[in-house]
Amino acid sequence: GENVEQHPSTLSVQEGDSAVIKCTYSDSASNYFPWYKQELGKRPQLIIDIRSNVGEKKDQRIAVTLNKTAKHFSLHITETQPEDSAVYFCAALPSGSARQLTFGSGTQLTVLP
Amino acid sequence: KAGVTQTPRYLIKTRGQQVTLSCSPISGHRSVSWYQQTPGQGLQFLFEYFSETQRNKGNFPGRFSGRQFSNSRSEMNVSTLELGDSALYLCASRRGGGSSYNEQFFGPGTRLTVL
């Protein structure tokens, strides 16, 4: 089955700096890669996603890049703000009949004011 | 549109008991997935239901089961509870069907504590 590794597990940045979280996946047939943000005590919420036919996608201060050859994808957050502090999860969805999201272990991002 | 709702929000049980958790998806969503979230293991997929049929199942023992009703509401059951079952149980709904995987929306979760 699919295996997703996420790094780093914790990340602290100064407000205004950029943050990058990286994930690798094992199944080359995976074709959908969402990122979720989970604030303390709240539900995970989708913040951005990318499909395998696209190399990069941006939404204001967040962007995701996908390298299918290397089987890794990354979340980039620019001009970080304290409200960006949360746990971020990446996930991958393999193609085929067993289409279930496999999640990375999460990154605790702390933005220091 | 109302979001995904889960009941109860908190539950305390003792070892050996069984528990039933409920999830009401967003109106119009036919797919409901269940996840177990623990600090050490992250988000682990339990199962997915679509149109009352289990479509996928994760690597959990048979003590974990679920079902979906004709109105797309779903329940999951855990029998013979163990201490290690203490976790946040999240359900998520999406429209389902079609060739593309559409966005999944999570509920607030049920915090289960097994004593």
Image: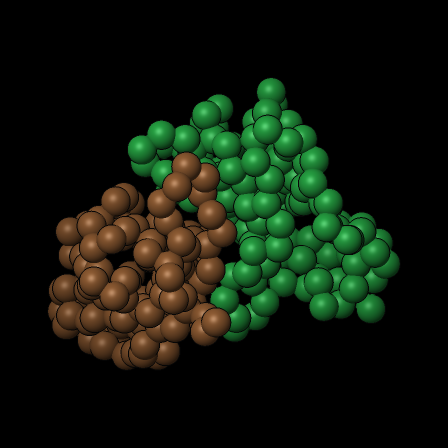
Chain colours: A green, B brown
- Residue reaching furthest to the top: A69
**Residue B71, x across and y down, in percent:** 25, 66
User: Is A86 situated above or below B31?
Assistant: below
Residue depicted at 22% across the width and 49% down the height: B54
Residue depicted at 72% across the width and 68% down the height: A83
Q: Is residue A103 left or right of residue A34?
A: left
User: Is B66 situated above or below B114?
Assistant: above
Which image quadrant for residue B115? bottom left
**Could you tell me which quadrant the N terminus of chain A lies in?**
top left
User: Is B20 situated above or below A26?
Assistant: below
Which image quadrant for residue B20? bottom left
**Residue A58, x across and y down, in percent:** 73, 45
Tally of numbered tags:
0
Between residue A100 and residue A108, name the one nearer to us. Answer: A100
Residue A5 in view of the camera? no
Which image quadrant for residue B93? bottom left
**Could you tell me which quadrant the C terminus of chain A lies in?**
bottom right
Between residue A94 and residue B70, name the one nearer to us. Answer: B70
Residue depicted at 46% across the width and 25% down the height: A29
Q: Is residue A101 left or right of residue B11?
A: right
Q: Is residue A62 left or right of residue B60?
A: right
**Residue A50, x across and y down, in percent:** 60, 40
Residue depicted at 45% across the width and 43% down the height: B101
**Residue B92, x across and y down, in percent:** 40, 59
Residue A31 in view of the camera? yes
Between residue B75 and residue A22, name the one nearer to us. Answer: B75
